[in-house]
Image (spheres, helix red, strand yellow):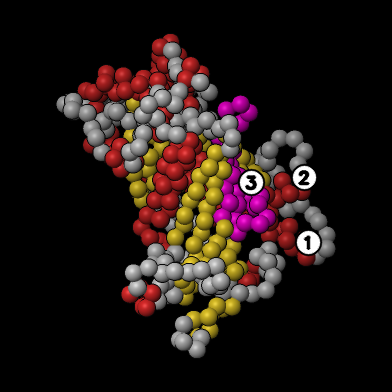
């Protein structure tokens, strides 16, 4: 297993030299994302769902995300005063907690899926915060002062992939990915107020279940984007509140299913929902170009050559919500500033294109609903361009599936787009 994941010196040199020249192993430029195939409303029993494929053919990362809504309530004064709150199965009230509205993420991998990220394996039992803090002792000059040590560190990361001592188990990897996405989505507390049903009494908890079918690089970014798409088509029932005999609000759930009448549903806003932009540095740093060697949407071989990476959480408005640095190499202040600026520009370009694709799918769905109500079917009259997968499509695929082509997120390319 480890022999399949390790790179020879020649392979490593080929990848590093290519990126230094601005050409990657699959022909992309350093700041270009792979083609994305996006499909929404794939799980009829979920409040929202999406499937995202990053890349195509043999080199793809494939994830499925489903969202289920649960009603929660804040603890009453009496319950808050008690040391513990016991709630048996016969209690039909929502689960009590003081945490409030939130998004909980659980990531699982299907059988046979091998996580290709060596920096996750290097975490062992440490938390992400513990790994992000240490810096090498050599910090003089430009960032490349510790490059020799960093290159050795990257080699060691690649050598630990066989599951030996100091590596993460599958369960630990899933837990780490779950923690990162939960932290990303709840940073700033934006969804705590948005998910309130009755202030200080009831709120929604959104359980996001992500399933990894294939991992061929950049898994964290793919999971974050798929979660954004699933939240975009998540609907929760519009609840009516009346005052009960004890003064506590009583909620009335409308009859029917979520798909019956959109007027009775509430859409979950995705504007506060950030996504990750992950930068990997492959090869040594250059004094003349702070971003020399940095790439986005890394392939597994590129991840194994990386000496450092920076994950940046970005919202639609280009606001930085969270950052996470990993790897043995250091990042100078100048490089960090450049990367954060690039993350804001890249995030705005990526989320702009992604949200436009979601809007196209939403228009298709609305047109299909209108046709169904009129008793006839006609494909939505839009998108003559090639924004659907190759080959014949079913009616459902035309409505719920689209393809985002290669996206270059360099500042010049983003400005021209």
User: Which residue: 65% across, 41% down?
Assistant: 387
Question: What residue lies at 30% left-to-right and 37% top-to-bottom?
Answer: 131
Query: What range of the chain is rendered magenta?
Result: 40-67
Density class for disc 1 (Cα within 10 Å; few <14, some 14-19, many ≥20) is: few
Task: Give residue 280's position: percent from left, percent from top.
Answer: 39, 31
Answer whether residue 220 is visible to the viewer in this image.
no
* 349 vs 366: above or below: above
Among numbered discs 1 and 2, the one appearing first in the sequence: 1
User: Residue at 64% of width from left, 74% of height from top?
Assistant: 254
Q: Which mark is residue 39?
A: 3
Question: Residue 394, which numbered label?
Answer: 2
Residue ID for mark 1 = 372
For residue 149, what is the image quadrant?
Answer: top left
Q: Which mark identifies residue 396? A: none
Compared with 29, 109 (above or below) is: below
- CA–CA distance between discs 1 and 2? 16 Å
Residue at disc 3, secondary structure: strand
Q: Where is residue 30 in the image (x, y as percent from the top left)?
A: 44, 28
Return the residue nearer the eye: 413 or 51. 51
Q: Distance between the residues labelled 1 and 3?
A: 20 Å
Q: How far apart in space, not on screen, are marks 3 and 2 (Cα)?
A: 13 Å
């Amino acid at each position: 297993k480890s022999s399949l994941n390790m790179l020879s010196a020649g392979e490593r040199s080929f990848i590093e030299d290519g990126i230094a020249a601005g050409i990657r192993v699959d022909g992309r430029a350093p700041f270009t994302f792979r083609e994305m195939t996006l499909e929404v409303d794939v799980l009829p029993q979920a409040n929202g769902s999406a499937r995202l494929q990053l890349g195509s053919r043999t080199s793809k990362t494939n994830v499925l995300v489903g969202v289920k809504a649960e009603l929660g309530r804040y603890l009453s004064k009496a319950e808050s005063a008690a040391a513990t709150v016991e709630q048996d199965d016969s209690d039909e009230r929502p689960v009590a907690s003081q945490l409030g509205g939130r998004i909980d993420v659980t990531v699982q991998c299907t059988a046979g899926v091998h996580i290709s990220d060596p920096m996750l394996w290097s975490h062992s039992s440490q938390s992400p915060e513990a790994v992000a803090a240490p810096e090498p002792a050599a910090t003089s000059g430009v960032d490349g002062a510790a490059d020799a040590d960093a290159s050795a560190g990257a080699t060691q990361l690649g050598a630990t992939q066989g599951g030996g001592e100091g590596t993460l188990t599958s369960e630990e990897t899933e837990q780490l990915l779950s923690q990162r996405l939960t932290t990303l989505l709840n940073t700033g507390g934006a969804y705590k107020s948005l998910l309130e049903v009755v202030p200080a009494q009831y709120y929604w908890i959104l359980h996001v279940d992500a399933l990894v079918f294939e991992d061929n690089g950049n898994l964290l970014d793919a999971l974050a984007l798929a979660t954004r798409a699933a939240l975009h088509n998540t609907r929760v029932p519009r609840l009516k509140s009346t005052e009960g005999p004890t003064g506590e609000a009583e909620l009335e759930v409308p009859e029917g299913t979520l798909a019956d009448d959109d007027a009775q549903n509430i859409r979950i806003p995705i504007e506060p929902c950030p996504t990750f932009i992950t930068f990997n540095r492959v090869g040594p740093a250059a004094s003349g170009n702070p971003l020399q060697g940095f790439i986005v949407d890394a392939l597994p071989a590129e991840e194994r050559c990386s000496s450092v990476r920076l994950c940046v959480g970005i919202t639609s408005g280009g606001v930085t919500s969270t950052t996470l640095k990993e790897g043995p190499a250091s990042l100078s202040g100048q490089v960090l500033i450049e990367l954060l600026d690039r993350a804001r520009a890249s995030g705005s370009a990526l989320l702009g294109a992604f949200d436009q694709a979601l809007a196209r799918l939403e228009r298709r769905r609305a047109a299909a609903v209108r046709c169904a109500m009129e008793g006839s079917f006609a494909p939505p009259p839009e998108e003559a361009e090639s924004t659907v997968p190759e080959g014949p499509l079913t009616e459902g695929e035309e409505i719920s599936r689209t393809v985002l082509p290669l996206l270059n997120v360099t500042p010049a390319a983003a400005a021209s787009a």
